[in-house]
Image: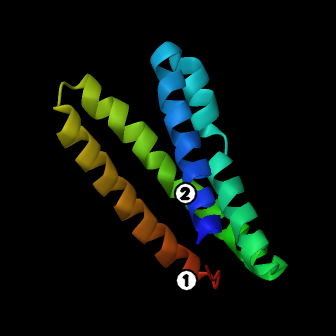
Amino acid sequence: MIYTIIKVIATSLLIVAISELSKRSSLLGALFASMPLISVLAILWLYIDTKDVAKVSDLATGIFWLVIPSLAFFVSLPILLKKGLNFYLSLGLSMSVTAGCYFFMTQILMRYGIKL
């Protein structure tokens, strides 16, 4: 149980640190947020928990393929905000666009025999 609490605290601290850094410098905030820090932590926690390199490899492969549709969020959100849409509406629409892109990407990958 203590290990799970440590994982939650470490991961939460990273997200809060990036959020606080972003208040001071959007460039530095974006730089740290764009790094695969959460993915690295997830891979690290998975390996520590399971010692299963096949699971780590599968996770890394899945992350690779799903980064592509996640980019839709970072394209659509600024466009919607610049068009003057409400922040929360823009956020929701961008998340919906991204969810649709995830769906289409998984369908395309399945069609070509790539299993996530």
Residue under numbered circle 2: 8
In the picture of the structure, the residue carrying the numbered disc 1 is: 111
Quarter of the picture containing the C terminus is bottom right
Residue at left offset 22%, top offset 26%: 83
Question: The residue tagged with tag 2: helix, strand or loop?
Answer: helix
Mark 2 or mark 1: name the one nearer the start of the chain: 2
**Residue sitting at 56 percent across and 28 percent down?**
30
Amino acid tagged 1: Arg
Who is closer to the viewer here, 7 or 37? 7
Q: Is residue 59 left or right of residue 74?
A: right
Q: Work out whether 59 lies above or below 9.
A: below
Residue 21: assigned label:
none
Image quadrant where residue 73 sits: top left
Relative to 1, 41 lies left or right: right
Q: Quadrant of residue 53?
A: bottom right
Q: Nearer the viewer, residue 60 or 43?
A: 43
Q: Position of residue 89 (x, y in %)?
A: 18, 41
Q: Amino acid at mark 2?
A: Val
| Percent of width and height locating residue 48 | 77, 70
Q: Nearer the viewer, mark 2 or mark 1?
A: 2
Q: Residue at x 44, y 65 (%)?
A: 102
**Within the image, what quadrant is residue 59 found in?**
bottom right
Compared with 30, 99 (above or below) is below
Looking at the rendered structure, the number of numbered marks drawn on it comes to 2
